[in-house]
Amino acid sequence: MNTQIEAYPTPDAHIHHTANMDESLQPKTEANRKVSPIDYIFMWIGDGVNLGNMTLGASLVVAGVATLNLLQTFAAAIIAIGIISVIFALNDRLGYRTGIPYVVQLRMSFGLKGSVISSLCRGIPAIVWYGFQSWIGGTALNEIAKIVSGGSFDNVAVCFIVLQVIQIGLSLYGFHAVKWVETVTSVVITLALLYVFGVLLASHSDLIAEKWVRAEGSWGLPFFAFIMMFMGNYAAIFLSAADYSRELKTGISDKKRGLLYFFPIFVAYGLTLTIGAMLASATGISNPVKAFAEVVDNSYITIFVSAFIVLGAVAVNMVANIIPPAYVITLLTKIKFKPAVTITGLLASCSFPWVLVQDSSAEGLGMFILIYSAFLGPIVSILLVDYYVLRKQQVHVPDLYNESGPFAGSNPAAMLAMLLGAGAAFIQVELAWIIGLVVSGIAYILLTKYAFKHSKFKKGTIFDEPSFKSGGNRL
């Protein structure tokens, strides 16, 4: 990985005049970048400390038997987080150096029309997760309302709607809201979960040790499948890494940005996976909210914990599940950013999250992650191969905004490589992400070199040597 600190390039002045695109999708200037490294760390802790990731930990305990023990769980987690951090730092580089969002980055490899399909592969899972997190938060909010009302109020659906309205309101402020929401929630929720960790150790340590810590587990397919599921849980997020890095202040090397991902993700996931597995072991319940109610029987503590569950749902949605699909909607419909985040919230409300959070759905949720990551692995592979191997990090950014320029239409090599990678991934769905990544990367290189000989998307790549040597600016 190149660790040289790069100077931030000034966006071409012609972009604003030639692109029929909302201001939110224009390259971020250095002056408009307000997220510091500390803000970035809190952002990823806030994103990781949530009930969805606890559910992932809880999924390790099936019918009272753990598929992985403590050592195997954390070995798989460290491997996955290391890979995630490297991919994050690699894929965020174009956005960090140029200020462009993910939906514009896609045009480099897939073309203006082809990027529609690949952007939907990021947007649709985010909307589903948005609804899932909001329903978890609504369930916790309902627990608070029941206690406060003395049991006279009990309506999860109403709480869900209230929470959606709040999140839509916050999301109208974009990353300005993300900064303060994540800073507050990452600190407070971590403290709350440490309390729950202490309660579980004090009251259920023997049962947890028997069912999870000392379980036989497996170093075979379940171990590698958990790594893939773990990475699949981040596949959509690091795919759109440019959406986050374009907000980060300039002057940070690739290596340091990698650490800005590794440490907060490790802290957040280490805590949530552990507590999720411990709760499932102690109670036999996969839904963390219901498990909390079993473990903590003090009403005031239940309110305390439930409040932070609500904050956790808001925190993860603000980072991972609102802004990326809103950018997709803005790109496809040409509407402004604020109406786009409102539509995103409405679509999330219609994603049937009440089905996803049922106890019987924990295994299905994991399968959903594996299935959609079968498409996301190929896309991130194509983006990395295109930028680092084929284009040698040379991209003329104004061309990405020119709707009649060299990236107009669809790149058949990228589209076919994505389908080949996704198809291969389904041969062994437990390893879908890595299979799709490898197959599509190789296929993209071979297809670009040997197929579609007159494709204009070869221009500027190593397979179009004359134009590459005289090509655009190094960005």
Image (tube, helix red, strand yellow):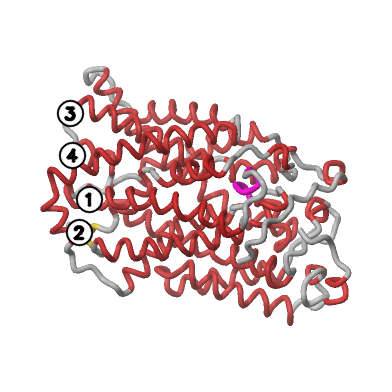
Q: Nearer the viewer, residue 66 or 110?
A: 66
The mark that comes first in sequence, 2 or 1, is 2
Residue 244 inside the magenta-drawn segment:
yes
For label 2, the residue is 212
Name the residue type under label 1: Met
Please state the extent of the stretch shown in magenta in the rendering. 242-247
> In the visual, does 20 lie left or right of 289?
right
Q: Indicate the amino acid at tag 3.
A: Asn
**Going from the N terminus, do you reach mark 3 or mark 2 first?**
2
| Identity of the residue drawn at 85% across and 72% down | 469
For the point 59% across and 45% down, the residue is 324
- Circles 1 and 4 in contact, beta carbons < 8 Å: no
| Label 3 vs 1, first from the N-terminus | 1
The image shows residue 59 at horizontal and vertical percentages of 29, 55
Indicate left or right for 152 with 182 as reference.
left
The N terminus - image quarter: bottom right
Distance of label 3 from label 4 (alpha carbons): 9 Å
Q: Which residue is mark 1?
A: 278
Which of the 4 quarters of the picture holds residue 26?
Answer: top right
99 lies above or below 300:
below
Vertical position of residue 84 compared to residue 190: above or below:
below
**Residue type beneath disc 2:** Trp
* Residue at the spot 19% in from the left edge and 68% down from the top edge: 216
Rendered-image quadrant of the C terminus? bottom right
* Residue 435 included in the magenta stretch of the image: no
Write down the residue under mark 3. 298
Q: From mark 2 to mark 1, how far is it between C-alphas?
A: 8 Å
Report the disc number at residue 295. Answer: 4
Tag 4's secondary structure? helix
Q: How many marks?
A: 4
- Are dots 2 and 1 in contact, CB under 8 Å? yes
